[in-house]
Amino acid sequence: MGETNNNALSTIHNRKSVRRYSDQKVTKQQLEDLVRAGMAAPSAVNKQPWGFVAIDDREILDKLGDALPYAKMLKNATAAIIVCGNLRKALDGWEQEFWIQDCAAASQNILLAAQAMGLGAVWTAAYPAKDRMQSITRILRLPEYVIPLNVIPIGYPLEEGVAKDKWKPENLHWQRWY
């Protein structure tokens, strides 16, 4: 990475998936700040077709952790945010699928904000896995027009961890694809 003193770039390059958390509680204000960061994401035609479920209830976190095969870390996280697509706010026709990109951008903002706030978080997929989506929908009582994209467990990291260097020059093409 080139020389920089840019806090945004530092946060991006130091973000890592955190799956182990201390028992220190994430506050409701921190969860609101994370969701606020999510809502700052760009969206197609500014439709903002998202909805967020913030959870700090131990019983619900445990139920989700039991139901979701790749989100067992919820059982030791002190909070989570579920990023959902609200199809009633989405575009019509074939453009409706832009909700996925819009909610993915919101999710990335949440992950970056968590890193910047000293919290740990990890993206665990729901969409398009029907069994995971059904479990989340049932546990959280989501209406039929709301589709869970992911579950983001959040907490204070138990260990420091090191971000992976994902730079691969062969993935950069100049002017055209070679």
Image (cartoon, helix red, strand yellow):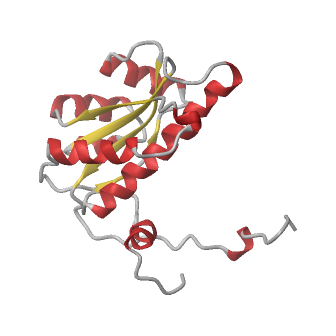
Give the vertical position of 34 relative to 58 (above or below).
below
Residue at the (54%, 24%) spot, across then down: 90
Image quadrant where one finds the C terminus: bottom right
Q: Please state which of residues 123 and 6 is positioned toward the viewer in this rendering.
A: 6
Q: Position of residue 21 (x, y in %)?
A: 23, 55
- Residue 76 visible in this rendered orientation of the protein: no
Q: Is residue 95 left or right of residue 16?
A: right
Pick whichever, 100 or 8, lies toward us: 8
Q: Position of residue 119 (x, y in %)?
A: 25, 58
State the count of labels: 0
39 relative position to 30: left or right: right
- Residue occupying the point 32% across, 39% down: 81
Residue 61 % position (x, y): 24, 34
> Can you say whether 133 is above or below 28 in the image?
above
Instruction: Name above or below for residue 6 compared with residue 117.
Output: below
Q: Quadrant of the N terminus?
A: bottom right
Q: Is residue 28 left or right of residue 157?
A: left
